[in-house]
């Protein structure tokens, strides 16, 4: 909510921008500093250096915020790509393990896959956490296997 002040003895009214609207606050700060710097030093307010310093900090923070948002978008895209690739790798792992354990499919649990005893099926992981756990268990099991059996 914008703050407004009106002096009854003056024709002027002060309106401050809504602090939640950062672009308006920054624009007002830039306009104020530009106006103040165009005046002689003795006519500037004593708060001009403080406001100029705060404005520089805000501009630096805004720039850092934009950079962080760009990095977040990049990381999000990379994560989506890796999740898709992980699904393909897990499918290859599943095929390998089910072929290796075709006589005893319950042994696939050692490689991190779930086994449904009632149907005799080796199940693929469905959630992100299950996929991570399966990848971890598979790597651990493969590292414990002799080199020739990997």
Image (cartoon, grey):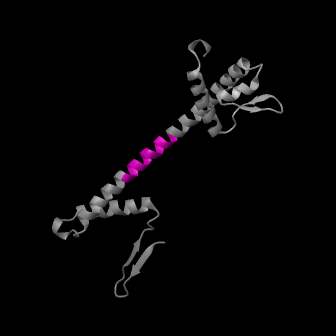
Q: Residue at x 46, y 72 (%)?
A: 2
Residue at the outermost right position: 118
Tell me residue 39's x, y (percent).
21, 65
User: Can residue 3 be seen?
Assistant: yes
Q: Is residue 105 left or right of residue 84?
A: right
Quadrant in the picture for residue 105: top right
Front residue (pair 18, 12): 18
Residue 72 falls inside the magenta stretch: yes
Front residue (pair 64, 46): 64
The relative height of residue 33 versus residue 121 in the rendered view (above or below) is below
Residue at the outermost top position: 148
Q: What's drawn in magenta, residue-wise? A: 61-73
The relative height of residue 130 versus residue 44 in the rendered view (above or below) is above
Quadrant in the picture for residue 90: top right
Front residue (pair 134, 58): 134
Residue 123 falls inside the magenta stretch: no
Q: Residue at x 23, y 63 (%)?
A: 49
Q: Residue at x 46, y 62 (%)?
A: 21
Magenta stretch: dominant secondary structure: helix
Q: Is residue 123 left or right of residue 119?
A: left
The relative height of residue 6 versus residue 24 in the rendered view (above or below) is below
Front residue (pair 23, 39): 23
User: Can residue 34 be seen?
Assistant: no
Tell me residue 40's x, y (percent).
18, 65
Tell me residue 58's x, y (percent).
35, 56
Q: Residue at x 50, y 38 (%)?
A: 74
Q: Quadrant of the C terminus?
A: top right
Q: How many marks?
A: 0
The relative height of residue 123 versus residue 51 in the rendered view (above or below) is above
Tell me residue 62's x, y (percent).
40, 52
Residue at the outermost bottom position: 9
Q: Is residue 120 left or right of residue 134?
A: right
């Amino acid at each position: 909510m914008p703050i407004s002040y009106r002096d009854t003895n003056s024709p002027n009214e002060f309106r401050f921008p809504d602090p939640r609207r950062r672009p308006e606050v920054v624009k007002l700060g830039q306009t104020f500093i530009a106006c103040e710097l165009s005046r002689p030093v003795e006519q500037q307010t004593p708060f001009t250096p403080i406001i100029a310093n705060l404005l520089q900090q805000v501009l630096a923070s805004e720039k850092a915020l934009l950079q962080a948002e760009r990095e977040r978008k990049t990381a999000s895209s990379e994560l989506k790509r890796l999740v898709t690739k992980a699904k393909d790798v897990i499918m290859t792992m599943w095929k390998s393990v089910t072929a290796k354990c075709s006589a005893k499919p319950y042994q696939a649990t050692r490689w991190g896959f779930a086994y449904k005893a009632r149907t005799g099926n080796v199940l693929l992981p469905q959630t992100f956490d299950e996929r991570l756990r399966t990848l971890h268990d598979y790597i651990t099991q493969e590292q414990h296997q002799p080199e020739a059996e990997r």
